[in-house]
Image: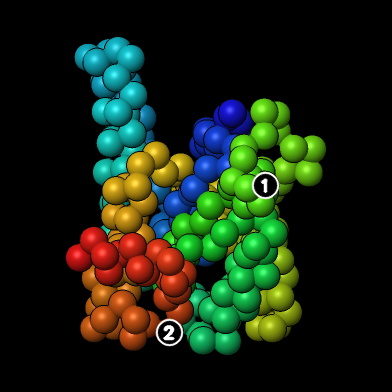
Amino acid sequence: MKTQYLNRLPHIAPIGATFFVTFRLADSLPQSFVNALKAELEAEITRLKKEFPGNTQRIRDARARNFGKYDHQLDTQPYGECHLRQADVAEIVAEKMRALDGSLYDLQAYSIMPNHVHVLFSMATQVVDDQGVWPEEIPEHYVQLDKVMQLIKGGSSYSINRHLGRSGKFWFKDSYDHYVRKEEEWLNIALYILQNPVKAGLAKKWDAWPFNYCSPYLLDRLMFRS
């Protein structure tokens, strides 16, 4: 069961899937950089569709490489106010993500960086019953990924603006989201999230960064693999 919605970018959001989502501050990247990367990705996808028709994996890989350039820029060349450097502001975001845990998703990992946030969660908690059985149809009460992100970003931006005595847009409207297809990919994404502050030079170890989180069972899986 899949749904697709449009914002600035097309998003595919299978029902009950596990998602890796990155969202950033509204002023975190210069528009010229964003426009250049967007044009680069569009040109690459056009080329791939022509040379390798029907090969969706190559397109996914191209999107992943493009995202990596965004994330590298966010980490290495901080731009804008970087409000999430403030511990009290970062905690508001963490509290909002934790508040939805267990009802709309199973929160597995996150890292709150100075100008962006990585989060990993499973939305199966909305559809799977106590016996682990999946429904044949989408439940009427199911909250789609785009609405979940609105709750996280909208609720946190309201609280943060009030806390800082500011007004205006806090988060960039769109988010990068990717649904996880395999367990190995799931574990690699978790490591990517947790190691983000280490790679950015903000901490020596992932668990020394105060705004990293990893669920106990995911941590067990990572330790087992290592």
Q: How is the image coloured?
A: rainbow
Q: Considering the numbered disc 1 on the image, is that residue within a helix, a strand or a loop?
A: loop
Task: Note whether residue 154 is visible.
Answer: yes
- Would residue 98 be found to the left or right of residue 179 on screen? right
Q: Residue furthest front?
A: 131
The location of residue 206, given as percent across then percent down, is 31, 77
The quarter of the rendered structure image containing the C terminus is bottom left
Q: Considering the numbered disc 2 on the image, is that residue within a helix, a strand or a loop?
A: loop
The location of residue 95, given as percent across then percent down, is 63, 76
Residue toward you, 75 or 190: 190
The location of residue 140, given as percent across then percent down, is 79, 38
The three-letter amino acid code for the residue at tag 1 is Asp
| Residue 52 vertical placement versus 144 (above, below) | above
Label 2 or label 1, whichever comes before in sequence order = 1
Residue toward you, 126 or 39: 126
Q: Residue at x 23, y 83 (%)?
A: 204
Pointer 2: what residue? 210
Depth check, mark 2 against mark 1: the one in front is 1
| Residue 39 vertical placement versus 78 (above, below) | above
Q: Residue at x 67, y 55 (%)?
A: 104
Pointer 1: what residue? 129
Residue toward you, 73 or 121: 121
| Residue 85 vertical placement versus 102 (above, below) | below
